[in-house]
């Protein structure tokens, strides 16, 4: 198993993993979000390789002393081999190197099956209400 930074050639592999694990969005949204994060800080997009193949991905970002990660996914055929744990640990190490003191993740409320995994890594459930609104960049309401 190898944990490394993202390379451009990984994109097709990680989008397939996102699709197979139910994390897909539209192709454009996924590519745009990934491109923004890579431009901002490519060292926080990490890949797990297993037997020479891309097998997992995690995307992190930092806001001050807070680290966030999202879109953690491991090829369903390889789940249970420790890849997700290694990805989280590697990203946390990079966060620590940059002065992050707290890490936040958001889990879809319909995806409770991942909670034991995150709990095993020391994450605690905190109750928050998240409000969201999609803004059309072409619209000018003002």
Image (cartoon, rainbow, N blue to C red):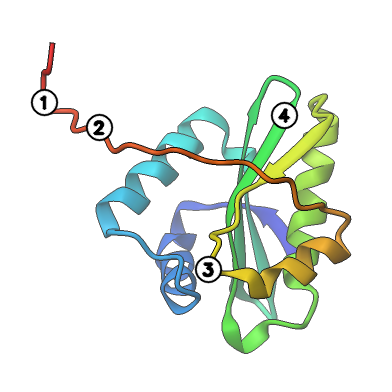
Q: How packed is label 3: few (under 14 Cα within 10 Å), some, or many (20 or more)?
A: few
Q: Nearer the viewer, mark 2 or mark 3?
A: 3
Q: Earlier in the sequence, mark 2 or mark 4?
A: 4
Q: Read off the residue under disc 4.
A: 66
Q: Read off the residue under disc 2.
A: 135
Q: What's the residue at 79%, 51% (across, down)?
A: 90
Q: Earlier in the sequence, mark 3 or mark 1?
A: 3
Q: Secondary structure at mark 2?
A: loop
Q: Secondary structure at mark 1?
A: loop
Q: How packed is label 1: few (under 14 Cα within 10 Å), some, or many (20 or more)?
A: few
Q: Read off the residue under disc 1.
A: 139
Q: Nearer the viewer, residue 42 or 23?
A: 23
Q: Is residue 23 left or right of residue 95?
A: left
Q: Quadrant of residue 32?
A: top left
Q: Quadrant of residue 116?
A: bottom right
Q: How packed is label 2: few (under 14 Cα within 10 Å), some, or many (20 or more)?
A: few
Q: Earlier in the sequence, mark 2 or mark 3?
A: 3
Using the rendered image of the protein, determine whether residue 114 is visible from the camera's viewpoint: yes
Measuring from the top left, give residue 89's x and y in whole percent: 82, 54
Using the rendered image of the protein, determine whether residue 1 is visible from the camera's viewpoint: no
Q: Is residue 111 left or right of residue 121?
A: left
Q: Nearer the viewer, residue 114 or 40?
A: 114
Measuring from the top left, give residue 55's x and y in whole percent: 61, 74
Question: Does the CB distance between marks 3 and 1 fall below 8 Å?
Answer: no
Q: Nearer the viewer, residue 29 or 135?
A: 135
Q: Is residue 75 left or right of residue 30?
A: right
Cα distance between the residues tagged 1 and 2: 8 Å
Q: What's the residue at 77%, 69% (across, down)?
A: 117
């Amino acid at each position: 198993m190898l944990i490394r930074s993202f390379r451009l050639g990984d994109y097709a592999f990680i989008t397939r993993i996102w699709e197979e694990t139910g994390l897909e969005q539209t192709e454009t949204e996924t590519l745009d979000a990934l491109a923004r994060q890579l431009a901002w800080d490519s060292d926080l997009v990490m890949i797990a390789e297993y037997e020479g193949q891309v097998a997992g991905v995690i995307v992190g970002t930092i806001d001050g002393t807070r680290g966030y990660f999202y879109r953690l996914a491991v090829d369903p055929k390889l789940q249970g081999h420790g890849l997700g744990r290694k990805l989280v640990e590697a990203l946390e190490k990079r966060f620590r190197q940059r002065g992050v003191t707290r890490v936040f993740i958001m889990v879809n409320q319909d995806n409770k099956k991942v909670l034991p995994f995150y709990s095993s890594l020391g994450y605690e459930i905190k109750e928050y209400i998240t409000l969201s609104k999609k803004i059309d960049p072409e619209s000018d309401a003002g």
